[in-house]
Image (cartoon, helix red, strand yellow):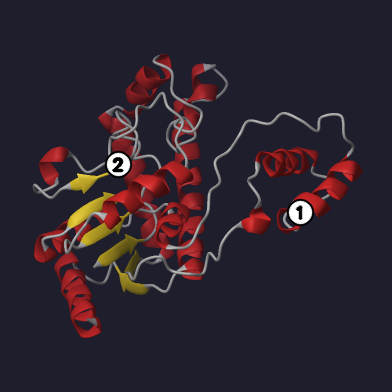
Amino acid sequence: MIIAIVGPTGVGKSEVALQLALKLKAQIINADAFQVYQNMDIGTAKVPLEKRLNIPHHLIDVVPFQERFDVARYQKMARALLDARDNTPMILVGGSGFYLKSVLHDFNFPEKKPINEGQELTNEALVEALKLLDPERLKNVHENNRKRLLNAYQRALSGDLMSLETNQAKKIYPYYVFGLDMPRKDLYQTIEQRVDKMIEQGLESEVKTLVSQGMSKTAIDAIGYKEWFPYWAGEISLAEVVAAIKTNTRRYAKRQLSYFKHQFEVTWFDKKERSVSNIVTDILDVLQTSV
């Protein structure tokens, strides 16, 4: 049995996943793009070890923060866990919708080869080349966006062709998706309180330490980490850093909800109106009637 617990950041997914895992004797697979990194603890709101209730957790703290990490690598690691699960229920929990879908659906990520060609070509020439090499990707790139045209051309030359990607609507595994949400006002208030708590816990110190040791470009892109550089440069105040983190987190939560509602069939629960125990009970009822 494969279950996914999804929803916007800060809504309380981990709490529900932990209680559900206890009931099902399940294991948990992280589905957050940044919790895979070691030492990125405060800013990614990892569940502390002492609160994981001795439940096996996978794909948390598995990648040094100095390394680049991407969805193709995550897909390979998560599928290996699912393929080896026997009859153990597995719960994927997190807000990185594309990572989750790449595991559960028929996504193909060809091995990328570094290509640095096409700089001398005009936009018109790049468009004509893409018409032949990868017309599907060209549909999503404006002819005046040189950066994306060049990227699409180089990816096509490397063999990373959208035109050859497999059927992303096709499920690789049978699974259930349960989502948590709450009224927008309450969610945003929760997010702001969460950011304030991160600041109190020493988020700035965490980021400064990691940056000094060489964070990778993919790791530093996490919300709560990338916002500090203008502050350290003396360009903005601490209050403005905190405001930027809150704004970026709210925007991210909105994108998360939109993705889950459009890309998955989700059974939703209102986290404000329902207790964790009631939500877990309802999930178990759904699973029992579906088997």
Give the number of the mark in front: 2 or 1. 1
Is residue 17 depicted above or below 273 in this figure? above
Point 68% across, 31% down: residue: 115
Return the residue nearer the eye: 80 or 264. 80
| Quadrant for the N terminus in the image | bottom left
Return the residue nearer the eye: 62 or 284. 62
Residue 12 visible somewhere in the drawing: no
Residue 186 visible somewhere in the drawing: yes
The residue beneath circle 1 is: 138
First of labels 2, 1 by sequence position:
2
* Residue 28 image offset from top left, x and y in percent: 22, 53
Secondary structure of residue under mark 2: loop
Residue 170 placement, left or right of 148 = left
Question: Which disc number belongs to residue 262?
Answer: none
| Quadrant for the C terminus in the image | bottom left
Q: Amino acid at mark 1?
A: Leu
* Residue 276 image offset from top left, x and y in percent: 18, 65
- Disc 1 packing (10 Å; few <14; some 14–19; many ≥20): many
The residue beneath circle 2 is: 45
Return the residue nearer the eye: 179 or 249. 179
In which quarter of the view is residue 123 placed?
top right
Secondary structure of residue under mark 1: helix
In which quarter of the view is residue 87 placed?
bottom left
